Image (cartoon, grey):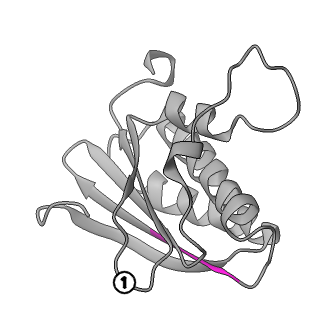
């Protein structure tokens, strides 16, 4: 969890239905565009990464079932925005959550690579009781997209 100095920006629960992804992207855009110093590149990088993470939750944690829940929380501390994604599916094997080799050309499987390439950090946290998985993404809003 973010330290106590972090300012809570937003929290919202979405279903694990792929049709919710547009609502997630729109909600994130509204929040991030209100943040001072958050460039359009920053907004787009964050939306891309969180969308990929949510798609991974839907596909790999909930196995495509639309009746699960994903909670997204945003916190800001200085120049960093932290995104916490919580699901209630079975815990994933973190060792299997690795990006595949980019030379392995085939559809899908690039979500983790995309997330790691645009975010400053990605890590699984110990989830609280009755939670399946807790993913933390951090983004330095002052970095330009090309510097990542």
Which residue position is annotated with label 1? 129
Side (left or right) of 110 relative to 96: right
Q: Which residues are magenta?
A: 68-72
Determine the image quadrant of residue 73: bottom left
- Find residue 111 and report its image quarter: top right
Circle 1 crowding by C-alpha within 10 Å: few under 14, some 14–19, many from 20? few
Residue 61 image-quadrant placement: bottom right
Identity of the residue drawn at 46% across and 79% down: 131
| Residue shown at 27% from the left, 56% from the top | 76
Give above or below for 88 relative to 127.
below
Residue 24 % position (x, y): 64, 65
The residue sitting at the right extreme is 107
**Residue pushed farthest top?**
103
Given residues 79 and 92, the one toward you in this image is: 92
Badge 1 element? loop
Which residue appears farthest toward the left when viewing the image? 5
Residue 112 in view: yes
Q: Quadrant of the C terminus?
A: top left
User: What residue is drawn where x is 28% and y is 69%?
Assistant: 8
Q: Is residue 109 left or right of residue 95?
A: right
Q: Residue at x 59, y 73 (%)?
A: 90
| Image-based side of 65 in relation to 126, left or right | right
Q: Is residue 78 magenta?
A: no
The answer to whether residue 35 is visible is no
Q: Name the side, left or right, on which 130 lies relative to 82.
A: right
Please name whichever residue, 1 or 98, is drawn nearer the observer in this view of the structure: 98
Q: Identify the main secondary structure in magenta.
A: strand
Query: In the rendering, at what x and y percent does residue 145 appear?
Result: 50, 24
């Amino acid at each position: 969890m973010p330290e106590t100095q972090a300012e809570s920006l937003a929290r919202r629960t979405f279903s694990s239905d792929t049709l919710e992804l547009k609502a997630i992207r729109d909600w994130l855009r509204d929040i991030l565009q209100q943040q001072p110093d958050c460039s359009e590149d920053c907004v787009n990088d964050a939306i891309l990464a969180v969308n990929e993470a949510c798609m991974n939750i839907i596909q790999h944690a909930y196995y495509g079932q639309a009746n699960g829940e994903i909670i997204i929380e945003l916190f800001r501390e200085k120049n960093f925005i932290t995104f916490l994604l919580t699901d209630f599916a079975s815990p994933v094997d973190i060792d299997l959550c690795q990006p595949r080799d980019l030379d392995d050309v085939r559809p899908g499987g690039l979500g983790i690579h995309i997330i790691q390439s645009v975010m400053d950090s990605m890590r699984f946290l110990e989830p609280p009781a009755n939670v399946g998985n807790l993913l933390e993404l951090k983004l330095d809003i002052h970095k330009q997209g090309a510097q990542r």
